[in-house]
Amino acid sequence: MVDAQLIPRGIKDERVLTAMRKVPRHLFVDEPMQHKAYDDMALPIGEDQTISQPYMVAIMTELLQMKGDEKILEIGTGSGYQAAVLAELSLAVFTIERKAVLAKKAEERIRALGYANIKVKVGDGTLGWPEESPFDRIIITAGSPQLPQPLIEQLSDGGIIVAPVGDRFSQQLVVIKKLKGALSEQLHTPCIFVPLIGEYGWEKG
Ligand code: SAM
């Protein structure tokens, strides 16, 4: 996966490549999907949700520019795979999933693999995790109509948010940096994510 997909498509950060070589992606999907776990595609994980395409995980992780001592917030735990990759590269990962069934399965996988630096919570991630804020990095792994204001407030100074922003069916990766209270925004790769449903996201349905 790393040699055939990620490096040829331009992922350069050695730390990201090493983490993605290490985390066993097949353990984050159900048994019938395991033979496809390293293919260049998103896969179903139940509840009409998906584990993101490996390239999308890699590019979003690379755009977060982590050094290793960051506190991360992820919105959209899904399978738990992205959280595990983040946990390889940072101090602590706080991840929120709105679907309890997925959060429970993700937590079981994360515990079985021995990740002690990941905390999973069920809830509306568009509200963030105020008790644990501020966060050095925030990643949204569902398509958002705009950046949820609570997440901007919970980002530390010098922090970075990476999120797919657009309409319900197609988005573009947006990188937001906060410096001395001011925000700057850069647009990246076009992408397609399942919708972010919540108070500062899309309505359910
Ligand atoms: N990061 C995941 C992984 O590694 O498997 C993939 C995430 S999947 C593309 C998007 C997830 O976001 C779904 O599991 C969905 O239920 C969740 N989601 C959507 N809206 C949410 C919200 N407001 N708060 C938390 N999770 C949300």
Image (cartoon, rainbow, N blue to C red):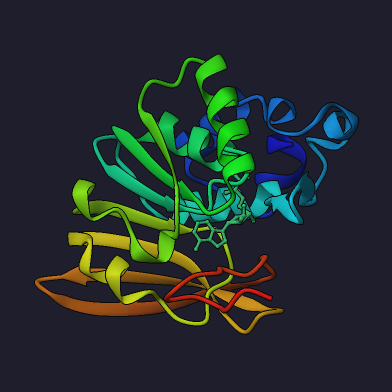
Quick check: can you spot residue 8? no
Quadrant containing the N terminus in the rendered view: top right
Q: Nearer the viewer, residue 5 or 137?
A: 137
Q: In which quarter of the image is residue 39?
A: top right
Quadrant containing the C terminus in the rendered view: bottom right
In this rendering, the answer to whether 71 lies above or below 126 is above
State left or right for residue 108 relative to residue 29: left
Q: Residue at (59%, 50%) from the top-left corner?
A: 99
Q: Residue at (68%, 37%) from the top-left corner?
A: 2
Q: Residue at (84%, 26%) from the top-left corner?
A: 31
Q: Which of 129 and 69 is in front in this view?
A: 129
Quick check: can you spot residue 34? yes
Where residue 118 appears, as percent x and y from the top left, is: 40, 31
Q: State how many labels appear.
A: 0
Where residue 84 appears, as percent x and y from the top left, is: 51, 32
Where residue 21 appears, as percent x and y from the top left, is: 62, 28
State left or right for residue 122 relative to residue 113: left
Q: Quadrant of residue 32?
A: top right
Where residue 151 appears, as percent x and y from the top left, is: 31, 66
Quadrant for ligand 1 reads: bottom right
State left or right for residue 130 relative to residue 188: left
State left or right for residue 195 relative to residue 184: right
Q: Quadrant of residue 36?
A: top right
Name the outermost residue toward the left.
180
Q: Residue at (24%, 36%) from the top-left corner?
A: 69
